[in-house]
Image (cartoon, helix red, strand yellow):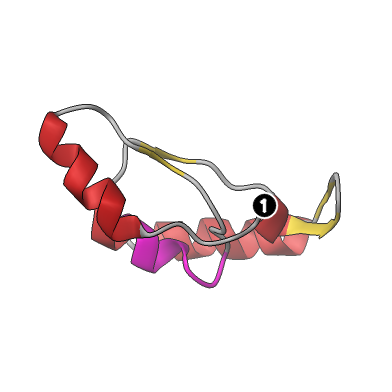
Amino acid sequence: TGESFDWALAVEAKKFGLPIILSGGIGPDNIRDAVSAVKPFAVDVNSKVEIRPGKKSPELIKRLRDALNSLY
């Protein structure tokens, strides 16, 4: 849907000891905050890196990668 998910719920879910795959409205502008807050096993991105439905933007993907790389 491209709508942001309440990441606090994912933080609570981690208490069960299961790997978290974070998704929901994650893109280049908020992935650092999401990953820092939740520390997920994986992140699923889709619509926030598209220029139109089904068409990924190389520039948005690069920005997403750069944002993630800045965390490590």
Q: Position of residue 18 (x, y in %)?
A: 22, 27
Residue found 22% across the figure and 40% down from its top: 13
Residue extent of the magenta highlight? 28-35
Task: Locate residue 68 relative to residue 36 in the image: left or right.
Answer: right
Task: Locate residue 61 relative to residue 4 in the image: left or right.
Answer: right
Q: What secondary structure is the stretch in magenta mostly built from?
A: helix
Q: Is residue 64 magenta?
A: no
Foreground of the two, 13 or 55 = 13
Q: Which residue is mark 1?
A: 1
Q: Position of residue 42 (x, y in %)?
A: 40, 37
Residue found 45% across the figure and 57% down from its top: 5
Outermost bottom residue: 29
Q: Is residue 29 magenta?
A: yes
Residue found 53% across the figure and 58% down from its top: 26
Q: Quadrant of residue 29?
A: bottom right
Outermost top residue: 18
Q: Is residue 8 in view?
A: yes
> Please, what secondary structure does the residue beneath circle 1 have?
loop
Residue found 54% across the figure and 56% down from its top: 65
Few, some or many residues within 10 Å of mark 1 (<14, 14–19, 20+): few
Q: How many tags in the picture?
A: 1
Location of the C terminus by quadrant is bottom left
Q: Amino acid at mark 1?
A: Thr
Foreground of the two, 14 or 55 = 14
Please say if 65 is above or below 14: below
Task: Locate residue 54 relative to residue 8 in the image: left or right.
Answer: right
Q: Position of residue 17 (x, y in %)?
A: 14, 29
Q: Is residue 70 in view?
A: no
Q: Position of residue 10 (x, y in %)?
A: 29, 47
Q: Quadrant of residue 6?
A: bottom left
Please say if 55 is above or below 71: above
